[in-house]
Amino acid sequence: MNGGQSLGEFERIATYFAPLAGPEALGLSDDCALMRPRPGFEIVLTTDTMVGGVHFFHDDPADLIARKLIRVNLSDLAAMGAIPRGYLLASSWRRDTTDAWIAAFAEGLRQDQAAFSVALFGGDTTSTDGPVTLTLTAIGEVEQGKALRRSTARPGDSLWVTGCIGDAGLGLRLRKGDALHASDRDRAYLLERHRLPTPRIEIGRALIGRASAAIDVSDGLLADIGHICETSGLGARIEAAAIPLSDPARRLVQAREAEIAALASAGDDYEICFSLPPSATPSDIPATRIGVLTDGTGVALIDPTGREVAVKHRGFRHF
Ligand SMILES: [Mg+2]
């Protein structure tokens, strides 16, 4: 953690971040970390930034912000079938950020380091007059040549998704104060699904050598299927009724196609969408078949009568 900090910032690093460092970090005493991948593996890298007021609310608990930051990055590693190893963290704290906030943030990192077997490899801290800005670079490894890709799907392959879709989008709407008629219990479930996604690391590992393509659902199911289609040069037909919804989500949207389309366009699910050769089934993987990849272009959402469902916004647009 280098570069022109005040003594206070060095003390913060020593107090809160040094205990999180793995052996690769060399005690945070050198300019870089050193990581040796296992023989036969290659390194997989990904980075994501979260900005206060954009990706999280300023009054979100600091430990949950930290855990979501780790998890969204690990989700990208999971989608490529990688084993997480560690991460670099670049953080710009507001000048009025308290030690208590940073202590809670570091505690969130510690919890998820333990949960996902990763360690801090290094990073940088600065202060800013703007919003808190957190960039985490996750580092993993995967068997050489075996990483799951978006671009390798084939026409006729079936499309599958893990878990349930739309919970996080509904959780975000609740968090923003939308008047949804949800019970207290459903509300708590949906809010939690938005605040703390679960990266599907074991599923990504299980898909190696089996899935023809994979992506994690971060921008919205339909948008992310669109990424597989664009890079693979294919189209997709998705059955709206097949999109897996949790019981709390189903109670809110009552399986109306327009609302399913909205859930399939909301982001932050962090499930894995993957394709399989036509005759294959992922019998040991908790996933739902939602459609098929076709020759052609575009992602069509189909209702039970075979009609295409109009989709207003196909996912989170970054700009
Ligand atoms: Mg991703």
Image (cartoon, rainbow, N blue to C red):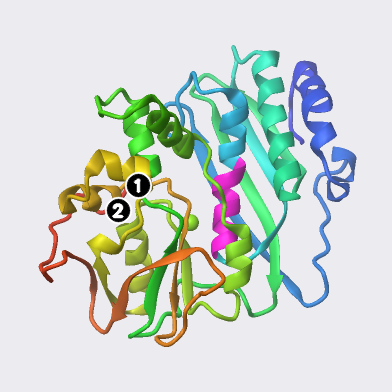
Query: Are the residues flagged by discs 1 and 2 in contact, CB closer than 8 Å?
Result: yes
Identity of the residue drawn at 43% across and 32% down: 191
**Gap in angstroms between the C-alphas marked 1 and 2:** 6 Å
Q: Is residue 77 magenta?
A: yes
Task: Decide: is 57 above or below 79.
Answer: above
Whether residue 72 can be seen here = yes
Location of the C terminus (image quadrant)? top left
Q: Which residue is mark 2?
A: 264
Rendered image: mark on residue 275: none
Q: Nearer the viewer, residue 316 or 30?
A: 316
Residue 101: image quadrant is top right
Residue 259 drawn at (x, y percent): 20, 47
Find the magenta span and give its range: 70-79
Residue 310: image quadrant is bottom left
Q: Which residue is mark 1?
A: 166
Residue 64 drawn at (x, y percent): 58, 30
* SS under mark 1: loop
Predominant secondary structure, magenta span: helix
Q: In the current view of this chain or complex, which residue is farthest to the bottom?
A: 279
Identity of the residue drawn at 74% across and 35% down: 110
Task: Decide: is 75 above or below 57.
Answer: below
Identity of the residue drawn at 45% across and 25% down: 57
Is ligand 1 within 8 Å of the beta carbon of the residue shown at mark 2? no
Mark 2 is on which residue type? Ala
Task: Decide: is 231 above or below 271.
Answer: below
Q: Is residue 269 magenta?
A: no
Is ligand 1 within 8 Å of the beta carbon of the residue shown at mark 1? no
How many numbered circles are shown? 2
Residue 278: image quadrant is bottom left
Q: Residues within 10 Å of mark 2 (few under 14, many from 20)?
A: many
Task: Decide: is 99 above or below 292.
Answer: above
Mark 1 is on which residue type? Gly
